[in-house]
Image (tube, helix red, strand yellow):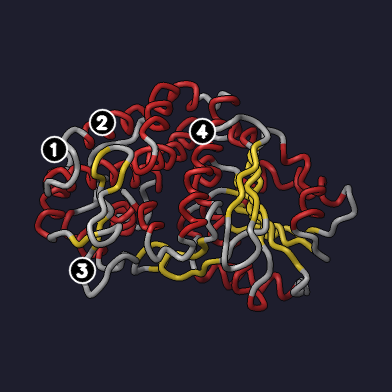
Amino acid sequence: MGQGAGTTVQVSTGLGPDYAVIVEPGALDRLPDLLGEFAPAHKYALISDDTVFGLHGDRVTRLLAGTGLQVEPFTFPAGEASKTRDTWADLTDRMLDACFGRDSVVLALGGGVTGDMAGFVAASYMRGVPVVQIPTSLVAMIDAAVGGKTGVDTPAGKNLVGAFHPPRLVLADPELVTTLPRAERAQGLVEAVKHGAIMDLPYLDDLERSMAVLLEAESEALTRAVVRSVELKASVVSEDEREAGLREILNFGHTLAHAIEAAVSYAVPHGSAVGLGMILEARLGEALGITAPGCSERLRGVVRSLGIPEHLPPGAAPGEIMSYLGADKKTRGGEVRFVLLSELGAIDRADDWSRPVPAAAVEEILTAAVAT
């Protein structure tokens, strides 16, 4: 699983300069020098939620101010409920009030919500300023901070308003994950499981063997996992930056996950929704004769080892989940499309990377997942 500490993965982009993802324990201490190399600016807007800022904000501001860099923090309430157009408007208005110009850089310090939110602020502020992603959660290091997707949630669904805006740099310091509760690390590891399930069976095997030490944030195992997931995701987004084809495979488990999240007003953690979504979408593929038998049961075992429920959360009625599927970004001509496995480590491909699936088959899978 990768090469250990101090690994740099390059991501190709047609929307701006190629960028580096640096995965290195302790790398946050090098932030001032790295900003000078990759994202010099007159002034830096440090965007973070109030929880993460309480953990790491003072350290980052002292690091930058101590080397003469101008930095001003902008915080918002932690949680998915803050990932809205209202929060985006508030952050951009505060930056305008503080006289940030086009020679500014946004620093996204936090998890996936902060990365998406700050990235969207950067993409739209004065028609676009650079952003540096500094993920502090495992899900952000493994997945969300890489690829240039930014956006906010709406009542109609998750991430439906946003932009592609590649970062100038992603600085992933696995030491930051040690401040997270074990349950939060489990949420991030779901995305690593997804990467193995769709592209790399030996990686999935390694994750399964290493799960206990990964959950305890053992540095070497954690760094290897972050590096391998970044390598896999970078290989996909470098080929298909705007999700016109291959990048759809990264949505495995997410079609149902996003609908489940919307059905319960985002009361369920994203990783939990994706873990359940992978199990259900593997069952769907098996029921349709597309996915090899046994894949869903293997995924169920891995997801259970993370302590993630395998049934629909309370209040997530199958009919309501179905009503949100139409807002999925893969929907074409009114047909909901799913990314399905052929076997573990490989996605089935017919005419495209996703395929339409009969609504009755989806509803049957959802109904069977209701806790009894």
Name the side, left or right, on which 146 lies relative to 365.
right
Q: Report the front residue among 54 and 308.
A: 308
Q: Name which residue type carries label 3.
A: Glu
Callout 1–callout 3 Cβ contact below 8 Å = no
Is tag 1's residue or tag 4's residue first in the polypeptide sequence? 4
Q: Of the numbered discs in the image, which one, if any, rests on residue 335?
A: 3
Q: Report the front residue among 83 and 185.
A: 185
Q: CA distance from mark 4 to mark 3?
A: 35 Å
Q: Name which residue type carries label 1.
A: Thr
Q: Name which residue type carries label 4.
A: Ala
Q: Which residue is mark 1?
A: 372
Name the secondary structure under disc 1: loop
What residue lies at 24% left-to-right and 51% top-to-bottom? 315
Name the side, left or right, on which 212 lies relative to 119.
left
What residue lies at 52% left-to-right and 43% top-to-bottom? 231
Q: Name which residue type carries label 2.
A: Arg
Q: Position of residue 262 (x, y in %)?
A: 32, 59
Q: Which residue is mark 4?
A: 225
